[in-house]
Image (cartoon, rainbow, N blue to C red):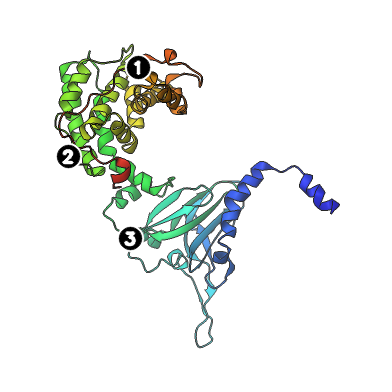
């Protein structure tokens, strides 16, 4: 009893405990996958010249719930190579013979039946990232792997990618085996690239005292963005008056600006506000949904950088655009002001403390709300309910 009490009183290495819960406990929940020997396969890890690296251990196992591939580098160095064929193992036949043979990685994972033009995906438990590969590449060349000193990878949830019309081939080529936090999110980034290109190209243009030429370019960009947003978010056709509304707002900016970067942020706000109003006459929340769903923060920050803003300030200007959309008329109502102060991103954009008063609000937060659309009366369904991933 005294010994158990002493163990409880010992200090705990919190980092080691976190890693245990992050990396070991999920595997314990799948221990059946690793328990059997029937489907266990040990693989050669070969470098570019074909030599086997004895310091890398690579093995797979599987059961009815799925397959796992484990790799571990038992040396203080970095190594790159491929996993394709298993080491020889005895395969028991009905006549009692046990000839030696090698299995491919796809066989070991239970994926050998897939056609060469299929794609497979898996998640690395260690990094948390998802990976995407062509079956033909794994079959012909094997799985490319780079491991650091004493590094490991545990690839789980192997499965075929469903043929759903989305550009998996483009994503696979772009990633080149590199992992991403979420493959679905990466596909969405591909889908919104045309929107980012249109808005980014316009924001990067010289803002020459809001000239008519510059305003017209913004209106044309808005038309194309609305076309893409309608397709991506399954919205009804937008109000055709939106480009004219944008021209008018750009001609009479509502926020005083002192630098080209601030002017770019003001233009970005006008652009997103006009796009939102084209779909939803209820106000700026429609524009906020577009800002979030189309992931416009990065392209607005890039537009600010194109006009001289340093990196952190460029991101702050992009956050300013969102805060202005999310907290319209925040200074006119105590509840709205409380919501603004409870939003850390909005507070960071404004530079205000959590106990700031409306009198301390920056000028951009007290600017008039976006103009309403002037066409149809029916509001479009919210993007959160109707969005269709690419």
Q: Please state which of residues 257 and 364 is positioned toward the viewer in this rendering.
A: 364
| Badge number at residue 366 | 1
Mark nearer the N terminus (3 vs 2): 3
Q: Please state which of residues 250 and 310 is positioned toward the viewer in this rendering.
A: 250
Mark nearer the N terminus (1 vs 3): 3
Label 2 CA crowd tier, 10 Å (few <14, some 14–19, many 20+): some
Q: Quadrant of residue 360?
A: top left
Report, in whole angstroms, how far the alpha carbon at label 1 lies from the one at label 2: 31 Å
Label 3 CA crowd tier, 10 Å (few <14, some 14–19, many 20+): some
Identify the residue at horizontal 22%, vertical 27% (top origin): 372
Asked if the residue at tag 2 contacts the one at tag 1, i.e. Cβ–Cβ closer than 8 Å, the answer is no
Q: Is residue 196 left or right of residue 311?
A: left
Identify the residue at horizontal 39%, vertical 62% (top origin): 139
User: Badge 3 is on which residue?
Assistant: 118
The furthest residue to the right: 2
User: Badge 2 is on which residue?
Assistant: 237
Label 1 CA crowd tier, 10 Å (few <14, some 14–19, many 20+): some
The furthest residue to the bottom: 95
């Amino acid at each position: 009893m005294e010994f158990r009490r002493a163990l409880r009183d010992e200090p705990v290495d919190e980092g080691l405990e976190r890693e245990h819960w992050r990396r070991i406990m999920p595997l314990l929940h799948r221990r059946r996958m690793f328990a059997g020997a029937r489907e266990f396969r040990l693989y050669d890890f070969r470098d570019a010249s074909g030599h086997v690296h004895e310091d890398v251990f690579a093995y797979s196992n599987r059961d009815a719930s799925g397959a796992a591939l484990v790799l571990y580098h038992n040396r203080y160095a970095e190594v790159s190579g491929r996993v394709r064929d298993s080491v020889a193992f005895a395969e028991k036949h009905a006549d009692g013979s046990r000839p030696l043979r090698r299995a491919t990685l796809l066989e070991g994972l239970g994926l050998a039946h897939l056609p060469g033009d299929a794609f497979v995906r898996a998640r690395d438990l260690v990094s948390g990232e998802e990976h995407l590969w062509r079956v033909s590449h794994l079959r012909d060349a094997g799985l490319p792997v780079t491991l650091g000193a004493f590094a490991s990878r545990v690839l789980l949830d192997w499965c075929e990618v469903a043929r759903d019309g989305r550009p998996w081939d483009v994503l696979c080529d772009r990633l080149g085996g590199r992992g991403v936090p979420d493959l679905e999110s990466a596909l969405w980034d591909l889908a919104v690239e045309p929107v980012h290109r249109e808005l980014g190209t316009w924001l990067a243009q010289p803002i020459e005292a809001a000239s008519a030429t510059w305003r017209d370019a913004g209106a044309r960009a808005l038309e194309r963005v609305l076309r893409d947003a309608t397709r991506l978010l399954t919205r009804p056709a937008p109000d055709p008056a939106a480009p004219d509304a944008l021209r008018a707002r750009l001609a009479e900016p509502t926020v005083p600006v002192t630098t080209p970067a601030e002017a770019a942020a003001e233009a970005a706000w006008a652009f997103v506000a006009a796009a939102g109003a084209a779909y939803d006459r209820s106000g700026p929340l429609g524009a906020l949904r577009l800002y979030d769903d189309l992931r416009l923060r990065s392209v607005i920050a890039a537009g600010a950088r194109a006009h001289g803003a340093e990196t952190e300030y460029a991101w702050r200007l992009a956050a300013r655009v969102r805060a202005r959309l999310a907290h319209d008329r925040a200074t006119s109502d105590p509840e709205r002001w409380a919501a603004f102060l409870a939003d850390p991103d909005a507070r960071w954009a404004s530079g205000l403390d959590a106990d700031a008063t409306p009198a301390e609000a920056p000028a951009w937060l007290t600017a008039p709300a976006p103009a309403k659309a002037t066409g149809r009366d029916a509001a479009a369904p919210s993007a959160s309910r109707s969005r269709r991933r690419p």
